[in-house]
Image (cartoon, rainbow, N blue to C red):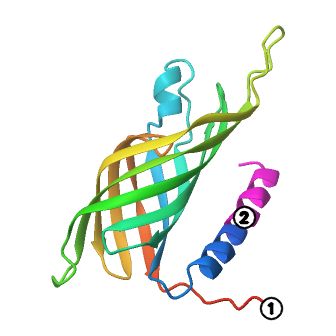
Amino acid sequence: MPDMLKRIFSILFVLLFANLSASFAQKGKAELSLAYGYYSSFTLYQGAPFNASTGTPNINLRYYMTNRFTLGLGIGFENNRNYGSFLTFAPEATVAYMDMKDAKVRVKIYGALAYGLTVFNDNNNNVGHDNQTGGKPWGFQFTPFGIRVGRKIAGFAEVGYGYKGLINAGLSYRFKPVHIKVPQ
């Protein structure tokens, strides 16, 4: 990932985290997840020879509106060296189908839907090629099946289609949002 994208990614994450923490303080729990996905919609749509993808590292911050429903924001990055790079920002909603919160090992089965903006950086600099760099309305993810195992710290795996990939897995950390007092 280029240094400028790393800086932008870091700044946006800190601003998002501070904003969500202040907005939803003491209303419920939040969850931060780090994951890696394979076979994104960008790679599958382009096909060969445009399928030299790095995979999709992504980060999500979700706020629990209820025990079964979350709202949040996902950010994912993919570099396809034969085509371009994709930085996606997508608001996301999840719904739990099943939550074994009273079991010794907590298991949660859920689905998710996200749609947002993808910033595309065209790597094809051939003469006569129309540069397609810019913001595109391509940032979506449909996840009909996800499983999270654990309580505060958990592992998860998701199967879906979109910017995170057909298979997306990682670790998540559930916490109470920090209350930030804003001077008036």
Nearest to the observer: residue 150 or residue 90: 90
> Mark 1 against mark 2, which lies toward the viewer?
1
Nearest to the observer: residue 74 or residue 125: 74
> Which residue is disc 2 drawn over?
10
Expressed as whole percent of the image width and height from the top left, the position of residue 175 reads 47, 83
> Which residue is disc 1 drawn over?
183
Q: Amino acid at mark 2?
A: Ser
Q: Which mark is residue 87?
A: none
Please report the residue visible at 34 percent of the width from the left and 52 percent of the height from the top: 158
Q: CA distance from mark 1 to mark 2?
A: 25 Å
Expressed as whole percent of the image width and height from the top left, the position of residue 106 reads 23, 77
**How would you rate the neighbour count of disc 2 (Cα within 10 Å): few for under 14, some for 14-19, many for 20 or more?**
few
**How would you rate the neighbour count of disc 1 (Cα within 10 Å): few for under 14, some for 14-19, many for 20 or more?**
few
Please report the residue visible at 20 percent of the width from the left and 80 percent of the height from the top: 105
Residue 111 location, quadrant: bottom left
Please report the residue visible at 43 percent of the width from the left and 71 percent of the height from the top: 172
User: Tag 2's secondary structure?
Assistant: helix
Q: Which residues are magenta?
A: 1-13
